[in-house]
């Protein structure tokens, strides 16, 4: 799905994966679920490109619903996958999140998310064994020239990926615009966040980021700008604390 010129989403907004197009070359942001491989091929075909045009894969973190086709893309096409080193073990499936990180749940939305994940290969996630390290402040020499902003909290190695040339911030699970476990909409901390307090603190790292498009790992695209997304998320977090 085309979001804006040279920005595309793969799959549905239940679990998001994205493409940045720079001339003939493509950078993929997050690898969704294993079943998204077919959707990636279809999206590339729709814009007159193939897997041979993919030059890089940037992972916002190492959770299983963000690394789905990463191992296959690296193995079959020789594409480099970039990941913050603090999440390397997570991408190799050597660590799991505790049940306490789920947060609030509602039966309908939670079951829908789990069923969607299972239908798209979420029960058999291939580990990503080999990644290229990226650090806070790096500007990657890949299509779109993305800038890396380390935002620990959801995981230790969570990052946002800022592409100024395309007016876009890929925010991973630092924020979600739909809570897949409750069905709530609007910017808020994503469920499965390991350290919510740290995740809220990390939002200050976006103060100097100017981008219209905020592209989360879960939920619809936000076109109200980074500053407003952060403001709404902070308000939501304050309300959640007040209800405890």
Image (cartoon, rainbow, N blue to C red):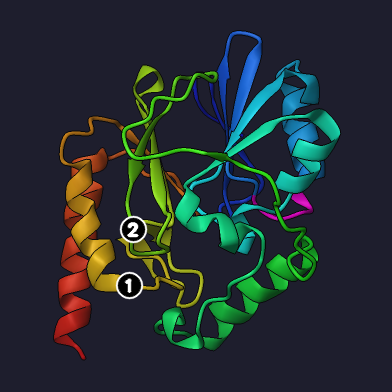
Queried whether the magenta region covers residue 60, the answer comes back as no
In the rendered structure, which disc, 2 or 1, sits on the residue that comes first in sequence?
A: 2
Task: Locate residue 150, reporting x and y percent.
Answer: 34, 46
Please tell me which residue lies in front, 212 or 34. Answer: 34
Task: Locate residue 120, reporting x and y percent.
Answer: 77, 60
Q: Quadrant of residue 135?
A: top left
How busy is the neighbourhood of tag 2: few (under 14 within 10 Å), some, or many (20 plus)? many
- Visible in this render: residue 109? yes
| Residue matched to label 1 | 195
Q: Are marks 2 and 1 in contact (CB under 8 Å)?
A: yes
Q: Quadrant of residue 94?
A: bottom right
Q: Residue at x 34, y 22 (%)?
A: 164
| Residue matched to label 2 | 152
Q: Residue at x 40, y 82 (%)?
A: 103
Spatial separation of the CA atoms under disc 2 and disc 1: 8 Å
Position of 125 with respect to 3 (left or right) is right
Against 211, residue 130 (above or below) is below
- Visible in this render: residue 14? no
**Can you say which quadrant of the picture contains the N terminus?**
top right
Please give the range of residues in magenta: 32-36
Please tell me which residue lies in front, 236 or 83. Answer: 83
């Amino acid at each position: 799905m085309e979001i804006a010129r040279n920005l595309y989403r793969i799959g549905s907004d239940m679990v998001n994966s994205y493409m940045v197009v720079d001339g003939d070359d493509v950078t993929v942001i997050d690898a969704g679920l294993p079943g998204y491989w077919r959707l990636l091929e279809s999206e590339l075909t729709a814009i007159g490109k193939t897997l041979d045009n993919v030059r890089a894969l940037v992972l916002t973190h190492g959770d299983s619903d963000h690394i789905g086709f990463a191992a296959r893309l690296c193995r079959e096409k020789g594409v480099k996958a970039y990941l913050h080193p603090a999440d390397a073990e997570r991408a190799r499936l050597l660590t799991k999140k505790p049940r306490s990180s789920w947060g609030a749940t509602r039966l309908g939305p939670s079951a829908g998310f789990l069923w969607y994940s299972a239908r798209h290969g979420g029960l058999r996630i291939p580990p990503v064994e080999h990644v290229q390290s990226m650090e806070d402040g790096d500007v990657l020499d890949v299509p779109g020239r993305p800038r890396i902003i380390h935002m620990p909290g959801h995981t230790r190695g969570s990052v946002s990926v800022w592409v100024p040339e395309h007016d876009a911030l890929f925010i991973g699970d630092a924020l979600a615009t739909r809570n897949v476990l409750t069905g709530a909409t609007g910017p808020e901390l994503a469920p499965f966040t390991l350290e919510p307090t740290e995740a809220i603190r990390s939002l200050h790292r976006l103060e100097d980021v100017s981008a219209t498009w905020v592209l989360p790992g879960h939920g619809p695209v936000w076109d109200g700008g980074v500053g407003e997304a952060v403001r709404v998320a902070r308000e939501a977090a304050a309300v959640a604390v007040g209800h405890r």
